[in-house]
Amino acid sequence: MAVAALPYKPFSREAVLGELEGIANWWATIAVDEEQGGFFGEVDAFSKPVSGAPKGVILNTRILWFFSELALFNGDTRYTALATRAYEWICHNLVDHEFGGLFWEADSAGHLVQGKKQSYAQCFGIYALSRYYALTQNSEALVLAKTCFQLVEKHARDRENGGYIEACTREWGAIEDFRLSEKDLNCPKSMNTHLHVLEAYSALYRVHADDEVSEALQHIVDTFLERIMDGATGHLKLFFSQKWEDLSATVSFGHDIEASWLLHEAVEILADEKRKAQAESVILALAEKTLRQGMSDAGFLCDDADVSSGHRKNISFWWVQAEALVGFFNAYLLTGNSGYYHTCETIWSFIQRYHKDDQGGEWYWTAKCHHAPAEPTYKAGFWKAPYHSGRAMMELCHRFDKLTPR
């Protein structure tokens, strides 16, 4: 009996590269705002730009990162030009020339809406600017990245208790509302912000490995190993008081698996054998617990679970699946456990069937089987960029290249 052909390419480097090209083409053709400059603040689930949508720092720094990294990946000058477009828009509209750092939000024309200094946002600036500098050798980009780094170290680093506070006012003073978004707990420290400090400092260290950056990267690695990782559960704790009291009510499978490979990247960049040895057990524990506790029978990684009841949120979000592909593939390379690779194949199949829009391009925020068709979330917007999905495809290509012939 003949087996019906799949409507998509099975998990392979070729398929991943094709997916990357599709994501890049969507952002290069659909998301560019020719009228007001830069990129649209929002493009809906039907690939239609939303007029007047605000333009946030997270979306725009992630776009800068993506096109910079993509141009480094494949050498296509079209993507260099798009990276420069993003860089120039950020410099003109989101850089605070009075108090330093990056604003949180501008309106569609680039006028300031919210000037607070979220540590998370400064770190996405560092991450993106570091890769743009790697691409272009634009010294002003490196200066801006280092300035953001120094501001975070001066105003957000907790020298007494360790780690970093969530946010400051525009003037870098104390703030009452620390939250990154409305769904977050209003507390001084979070795993999520520390994860992106780790990510950003790793990128900066790759292009500017001075003593100050080296010490800070070592500090954030140690903070994950000593404060954020819960050795008893194999998960990351999510929210904290100033003195690291655990305030978490859930575990986040998506962040656990994302952290597993970002932490591995950081210790590899540092080339510190002692920290590499300390981190390896954490990296593998995160991957193992995520695989065992987070995978649904339908073939996707669940978003999170309640700490007290263990109840899982059985909904598939695009970013969780993207990070799961990288984290599980990374665990496969570290352990040789084929179960991790087969899980990547399963998740890939789910993405192709339920997240990818074959007609309109890009990925849906929520799987098609998990949202009402009349109310899907945007494809591009304040919290959705080519960063998770596009980065995953590039990271997977790099990891496929490490496979020995089988």
Image (tube, rainbow, N blue to C red):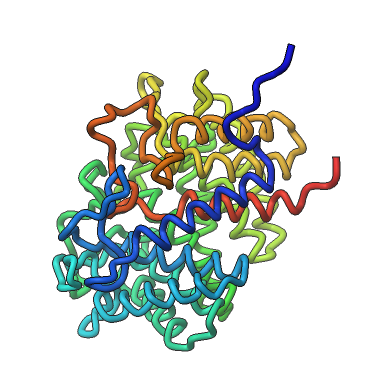
Residue 248: x and y, percent?
34, 37
Q: Is residue 273 left or right of residue 375?
A: right
In percent of the image, x 46 and y 76: which residue is there?
81
Q: Is residue 256 above or below residue 338?
A: below
Residue 280: x and y, percent?
66, 47
Q: Is residue 316 left or right of residue 378?
A: right
- Quadrant housing the C terminus: top right
Q: Is residue 59 left or right of residue 278?
A: left
Residue 157: x and y, percent?
36, 66
In percent of the image, x 38 and y 20: which residue is there?
311
Work out which residue is located at the far bottom of the displayed protein and give it: 139
In percent of the image, x 39 and y 44: which residue is there?
360
Numbered disc total: 0
| Residue 169 seen anywhere in this rendered image of the structure | no
| Residue 141 seen anywhere in this rendered image of the structure | yes
Residue 152: x and y, percent?
35, 71
Work out which residue is located at the far top of the displayed protein and give it: 1
The answer to which image quadrant residue 202 occupies is bottom right
Of residues 319 and 23, the one nearer the viewer is 23
In percent of the image, x 57 and y 35: which residue is there?
348
